[in-house]
Image (cartoon, grey):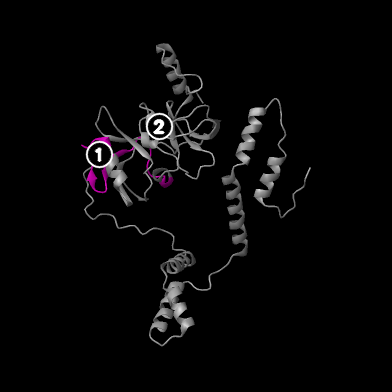
């Protein structure tokens, strides 16, 4: 059996492990699953990136200059105020290109370790309308990605409640929004008398920072427990064709034989999962095994089950 040296990297170890997998008649499916996972190019790339970062940490390099962009501005000003030869003219054109200047700005940001986003101050007109209720102001930084939460209206109180937190989304990463929280305002807009569809539209159109006024659940739930389970899909699924899914935009499409990582089974009907090897870290909704089996049983009963080659089998 080949032996790894102390200098062997993680991706070399992974390649060796993959080559050592031997067929086993008693565990064919498990062995095939492991081989597929270990052979994913994205996993190999992640291993290489990890090694590069570790190498970078061991070197502990320090920037020569923390304001390279400022130095370039001084050089450009100096060149523009004096006669220049051809070489200096070429240097001036090079330093004036937007790509180079953007790269220098990034360099300065990293050198100064200025990574945190700048958030605007909280509104001065914060009201005390909620007497004895505990109000929480949550400000999230949101780009073009969805917030990663679904909402519903409570049938008895009419309150807008956070129904589900999607793993890997902005709400989940913040750790500040939980299932059961009551949503009162979005960016200063009262949502009490708005339909969930209107609220979702406000959330989707919000860019940059988004401010939520929330009343925490009476018994605030802990963050979703890890329940990582890997499954191979035995059918194709498109959430846009599923009328039963609570939010089509939150659904996770997948193809037959895709390997899925189920990260939450808290909801007995809709699980949260990610595609193994996918660069998107946010989880999406998929039908649970029990729910899919019930749908198939019902379709068999009414005689609308499709051809076995195209039927959606349970996970």
CB-based contact (under 8 Å), mark 2 and mark 1: no
The residue beneath circle 1 is: 198
Q: Nearer the viewer, residue 295 or 216?
A: 295
Task: State the residue in front, 62 or 13.
Answer: 13
* In magenta segment, residue 133: no
Q: Are there few (<14), some (14-19), or many (20+) residues within 10 Å of tag 1?
A: few
Q: Disc 2 vs disc 1: which is toward the camera?
A: 2
Q: Is residue 196 above or below residue 13?
A: above
- Up the image or down, 13 lies above or below 108; here it is above
Identify the residue position indicated by label 2 in the image: 239
> Tag 1, which secondary structure?
helix
Queried whether the magenta region covers residue 185, the answer comes back as yes
Q: CA distance from mark 2 to mark 1?
A: 21 Å
- What stretch of residues is rendered in magenta? 173-199
Q: Residue 306: x and y, percent?
A: 45, 19
**Residue 219 visible, this angle:** no
The earlier-in-sequence mark between 2 and 1 is 1
Tag 2's secondary structure?
Answer: helix
Left/right of residue 292 with respect to residue 181 in the rendered view: right
The single residue placed furthest to the bottom in the displayed view is 83
Residue 75 position in % (x across, y down): 44, 80
Q: Identify the residue shown where x is 71% and y is 29%.
A: 24
Work out which residue is located at the far front of the displayed protein and give it.
Answer: 86
């Amino acid at each position: 059996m080949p032996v790894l040296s102390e200098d062997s990297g993680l991706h070399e170890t992974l390649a060796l492990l993959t080559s050592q997998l031997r067929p086993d008649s008693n565990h064919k499916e498990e062995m095939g699953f492991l081989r597929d996972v270990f052979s994913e190019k994205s996993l190999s790339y992640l291993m290489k990136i990890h090694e590069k970062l570790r190498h970078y940490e061991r070197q502990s390099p320090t920037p020569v200059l923390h304001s390279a962009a400022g130095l370039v501005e001084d050089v450009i000003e100096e060149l523009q105020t004096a006669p220049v030869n051809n070489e200096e003219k070429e240097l001036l054109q090079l330093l004036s290109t937007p790509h180079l200047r953007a790269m220098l700005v990034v360099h300065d940001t990293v050198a100064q370790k200025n990574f945190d986003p700048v958030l605007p101050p909280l509104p001065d007109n914060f009201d005390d309308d909620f007497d004895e209720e505990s109000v929480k102001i949550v400000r999230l930084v949101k780009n073009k990605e969805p917030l990663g939460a679904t909402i519903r209206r409570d049938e008895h109180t009419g309150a807008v409640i956070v129904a589900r937190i999607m793993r890997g989304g902005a709400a989940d990463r913040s750790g500040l929004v939980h299932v059961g929280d009551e949503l009162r305002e979005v960016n200063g807009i009262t949502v009490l008398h708005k339909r969930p569809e209107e609220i979702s539209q406000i959330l989707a159109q919000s860019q940059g920072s988004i401010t939520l006024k929330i009343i925490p659940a009476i018994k605030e739930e802990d963050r979703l427990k890890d329940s990582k389970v890997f499954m191979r899909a035995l059918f194709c699924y498109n959430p846009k064709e599923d009328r039963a899914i609570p939010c089509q935009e939150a659904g996770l499409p997948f193809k037959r034989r895709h390997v899925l990582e189920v990260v939450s089974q808290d909801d007995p009907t809709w699980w949260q999962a990610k595609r193994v090897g996918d660069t998107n870290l946010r989880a999406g909704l998929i039908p649970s095994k029990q729910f899919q089996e019930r749908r198939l049983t019902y379709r068999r009963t009414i005689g609308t089950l499709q051809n076995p080659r195209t039927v959606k089998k349970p996970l």
